[in-house]
Image: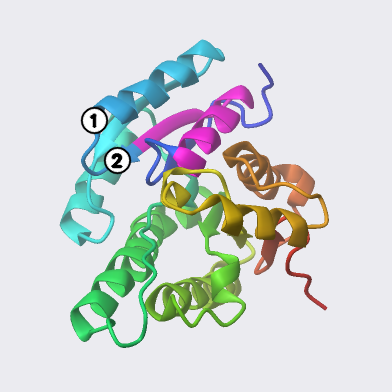
Amino acid sequence: MSTEFNSRVALVTGGSRGIGRATCIALARQGARVAINYINDKAAALETLTRVREVGGDGAIYQASVAEELAVGKMIAAVADELGPIAFLVTNAGVAVQEHHSELDLASFRHMMTTNVEGTFIPIMAVKDGMIERGFGGIVCLASVAGLRPRPLAIAYSTSKATVVAMARNFAAALGPTIRVNCVAPGLIETDMIAGMDDDSRDVMRQEAFVKRLGKPEDIAETIVFLLSEKASFVSGQTFVADGGRITLP
């Protein structure tokens, strides 16, 4: 196991599965103590913790809805008491829904914004002052390529992720130089979120990608680890697209 993160504490929201789980494991391999946030599935969170320990890491699980300010505050305090002050934050928790504009209503739009946008804003606000006081911090927010390009069947989701991109950029400007804030925009990743996608759609996306495959959670996790590491010490306010080449930015 590496000591890149020197036993510093990393909180990963939505850490019980998918990209969140892969990120917890990757951070543990680099020597971080990992706080694994989950909302409902305690068994899955415990499985993540088992995987963290299998690679020689240390951590604990914490239940909280990231869209509830009081719950997040209690979680941050518990992490500090049990593992230590939070040095790194990965805001991964989120939801994705595809729906035609004729099915979209204000309630579903608000749900998407609450979970994806407020669920990013609240954890950042909860950790930033402590990071500033200690003179060190790193934050990575999970966005999506849907936040960078039109998605007519995912208006609410695309809007929420575009907001996360803007939020990360503005927090980076506000919190620097002490805290670096960056964003990762994954493309199609093999997680539970795409379990219902048909094979034809998957094949089309594979062919569109320069690397001719779909992404794995580990692909995104390694990008997150890089952005939190000292190797990325000159990187802040950026959105890294990790989608195998389906979308290229100027």
- Region in magenta: 18-36
Disc number for residue 178 = none
Q: Vertical placement of 50 versus 130: above or below?
A: above
Q: Main secondary structure of the magenta part?
A: helix
74 vs 86, left or right, is left
Quarter of the figure with the N terminus: top right
Residue occupying image coordinates x 30% and y 64%? 115
Residue 52 magenta: no
Disc 2: CA contacts within 10 A as few (<14), some (14-19) or many (>=20) = many
Q: Secondary structure at mark 2?
A: strand
Residue 28 magenta: yes
210 vs 4, left or right, is right
Q: Amino acid at mark 1?
A: Lys
Question: Residue at label 2?
Answer: 38
Residue occupying image coordinates x 38% and y 78%? 156
Q: Is residue 188 visible?
A: no
Q: Are marks 2 and 1 in contact (CB under 8 Å)?
A: yes
Please tell me how many numbered marks the rendered image carries.
Answer: 2
The image shows residue 218 at horizontal and vertical percentages of 62, 37
Q: Is residue 40 visible?
A: yes
Disc number for residue 42 = 1
